[in-house]
């Protein structure tokens, strides 16, 4: 039973590791989909899988660090962001937004929160004093601090909105509500020291 569980866990890790996009390192949306389509939220979980993979000795710390440098460098320098937030889907080579639907062609705050959750996990894990790990933490801090969480209150309402697009605006008009996995969005937004939401919104 233990061997089977280990195998299932390693194969789950292998999806993110072996099938990560070769340019960006980000997680593809699915194995049988368009190979250029990567997902921001899924990549957050993939990043946590990398940390777990190191801990479980599936890969070395250096291998994990090298992949994280690729991912973070792509997110910082190539990926298109809207108000500092990421779209649901990106082109894994160019970083261009791939629309999720007709009006969902900009920032996806919930997917961004999953990505940030993974990035902050990596920031805490790669705690070495050498230049590479120090630089990685600095870049992750920059990505997190650039997300304009409070912008997504759509005019200072006491709720966060899921989507915003430069050309569609608030057309999706979808509030982040409910007792579900989206609650982490409020945690990420309340924790921001640069664009945080008030305790009332949280």
Image: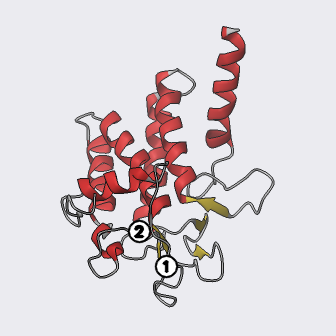
Front residue (pair 124, 190): 190
Provide residue 135's location: percent of width, then percent of height: 28, 49
User: Which quarter of the rendered picture does the N terminus lie within?
Assistant: top right
Instruction: Mark 2 and mark 1 in contact? Answer it, CB < 8 Å.
Output: no
Could you say whether the residue bearing mark 1 is in a helix, strand or loop?
loop
| Residue 95, picture quadrant | bottom right
Provide residue 93's location: percent of width, then percent of height: 61, 66
Gap in angstroms between the C-alphas marked 2 and 1: 17 Å
Q: Residue at x 53, y 29 (%)?
A: 53
Give the labeled residue for mark 1. Answer: 173
Front residue (pair 159, 28): 159
Give the labeled residue for mark 2. Answer: 85
29 sits left or right of 152 in the view: right
Front residue (pair 9, 77): 9
Q: Residues within 10 Å of mark 1 (few under 14, many from 20)?
A: few
| Residue 112, picture quadrant | bottom left
Provide residue 38's location: percent of width, then percent of height: 62, 60
Up-down: is 9 above or below 101?
Answer: above
**Disc 2 versus disc 1: nearer the observer:** 1
Residue farthest toward the bottom in the current orientation of the protein: 167
Tell me the number on the disc at residue 42.
none
Q: Residue at x 57, y 75 (%)?
A: 97
Precedes in sequence: disc 2 or disc 1? 2
| Residue 160, picture quadrant | bottom left
Provide residue 117's location: percent of width, then percent of height: 40, 47
Q: Is residue 25 visible?
A: no
Up-down: is 136 above or below 4?
Answer: below
Colour treatment of the image = secondary structure
Q: Residue at x 64, y 72 (%)?
A: 100
Q: Residue at x 52, y 21 (%)?
A: 56
Could you say whether the residue bearing mark 2 is in a helix, strand or loop?
loop
């Amino acid at each position: 039973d233990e061997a089977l569980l280990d195998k299932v866990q390693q194969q789950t890790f292998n999806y993110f590791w072996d099938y990560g996009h070769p340019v960006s390192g980000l997680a593809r949306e699915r194995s049988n989909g368009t190979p250029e389509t990567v997902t921001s939220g899924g990549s957050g979980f993939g990043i946590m899988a990398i940390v777990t993979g190191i801990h479980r000795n599936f890969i070395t710390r250096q291998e994990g660090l090298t992949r994280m440098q690729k991912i973070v460098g792509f997110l910082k320098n190539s990926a298109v962001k809207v108000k500092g937030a990421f779209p649901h889907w990106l082109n894994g080579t160019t970083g261009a937004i791939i629309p999720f639907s007709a009006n969902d062609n900009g920032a996806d705050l919930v997917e961004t929160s999953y990505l940030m959750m993974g990035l902050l996990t990596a920031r805490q894990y790669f705690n070495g004093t050498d230049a590479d790990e120090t630089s990685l933490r600095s870049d992750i801090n920059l990505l997190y601090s650039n997300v304009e969480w409070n912008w997504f209150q759509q005019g200072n309402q006491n709720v966060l909105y899921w989507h915003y697009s430069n050309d569609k605006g608030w057309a999706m008009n979808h509030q982040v509500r409910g007792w579900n996995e989206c609650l982490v969005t409020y945690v990420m937004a309340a924790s921001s020291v640069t664009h945080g939401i008030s305790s009332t919104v949280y």
